[in-house]
Image (tube, helix red, strand yellow):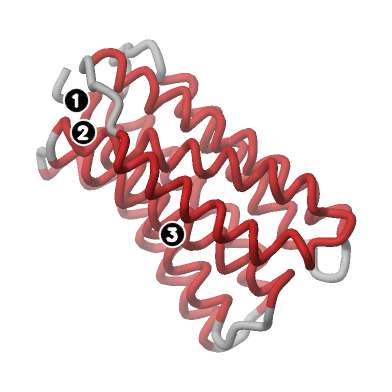
């Protein structure tokens, strides 16, 4: 990718740096302001670099990022408030569905065949995660199951994209890290407290969103 295409990444790098520094120094007011800006600046990067280029799934990608931004915003207020947790979960659920639409379209455009081992791996992971979570999720067991199934489907489609080369590997790695991030959120909330969980969740989440956006952006530019 051309160097000038990396310039729109500067706001993202700035926001991430400020956010991580604020985490280290426990500056909650900065975290509240900058968390939604992580995905917002990635959306800016995506729109700036792809410009007027048209692909049939571009709006789906935009909607995915917008709903992830909404999820980040709702989860800021979710500590001790299940209502905002459900809102955040729902927003990310919709975001993942739009990511599935994007990946599915790429799979169709590239005539990628079904890969059973990758799908079985994802299925086994989701099943194991639900085995741990369902007994402790109480009244939230149904949203937890629904969310797990959706992120599993997202990851399965993402893994199939490794067949298109480096950009596909970026998307697959992003999808994998997204599932890891969500898994730590769920395990920490429903199963057992995890030391330094916020660091694990945020670093994997930030990397996941960047890799997904970068991979999809590269795919659009090479068309």
Q: Earlier in the sequence, mark 3 or mark 1?
A: 3
Q: Quadrant of residue 28?
A: bottom right
Task: Say which of 23 and 179 sits in front.
Answer: 179
> Which quadrant does the C terminus fall into?
top left
Q: Which residue is mark 3?
A: 206
Looking at the picture, how far across and down is residue 133, in whole percent? 69, 63
Task: Say which of 121 and 46 sits in front.
Answer: 121
State if disc 2 and disc 1 touch (CB < 8 Å). Answer: yes
Q: Which residue is found at the position 47% from the left and 37% from the top?
A: 154
For the residue carrying disc 2, how many other residues have a C-alpha within 10 Å: few (<14), some (14-19), or many (20+)?
A: some
Q: Quadrant of residue 129?
A: bottom right
Looking at the picture, how far across and down is residue 153, in whole percent? 49, 36
CA gap between label 1 and label 2 equals 5 Å
Q: Is 199 situated left or right of 82 in this image?
A: left
For the residue carrying disc 3, how many other residues have a C-alpha within 10 Å: few (<14), some (14-19), or many (20+)?
A: many
State if disc 1 and disc 3 touch (CB < 8 Å). Answer: no
Above or below 21: residue 133? above
Q: Which residue is mark 1?
A: 221
Looking at the picture, how far across and down is residue 101, in whole percent? 47, 23
Q: Which residue is found at the position 69% from the left and 41% from the top?
A: 146
State if disc 2 and disc 3 touch (CB < 8 Å). Answer: no
């Amino acid at each position: 990718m051309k160097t000038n295409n990396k310039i729109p990444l500067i706001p993202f790098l700035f926001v991430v740096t400020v956010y991580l520094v604020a985490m280290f120094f426990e500056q909650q007011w900065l975290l509240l302001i900058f968390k939604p800006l992580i995905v917002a600046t990635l959306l800016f990067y995506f729109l700036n670099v792809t410009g007027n280029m048209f692909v049939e799934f571009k709006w789906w990608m935009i909607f995915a990022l917008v709903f992830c931004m909404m999820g980040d915003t709702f989860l800021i207020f979710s500590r001790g408030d299940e209502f905002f947790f459900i809102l955040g979960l729902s927003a990310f659920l919709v975001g993942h569905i739009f990511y599935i639409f994007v990946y599915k379209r790429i799979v169709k455009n590239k005539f990628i065949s079904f890969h059973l081992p990758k799908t079985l791996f994802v299925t086994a992971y989701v099943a194991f995660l639900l085995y741990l979570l369902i007994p402790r999720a109480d009244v939230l067991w149904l949203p937890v199951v629904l969310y797990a199934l959706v992120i599993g489907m997202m990851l399965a489609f993402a893994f199939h994209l490794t067949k298109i080369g480096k950009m596909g590997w970026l998307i697959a790695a992003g999808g994998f890290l997204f599932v890891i991030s969500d898994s730590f959120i769920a395990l920490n909330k429903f199963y057992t407290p995890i030391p330094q969980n916020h660091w694990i969740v945020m670093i994997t989440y930030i990397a996941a969103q960047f890799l997904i956006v970068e991979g999809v952006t590269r795919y659009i530019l090479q068309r």
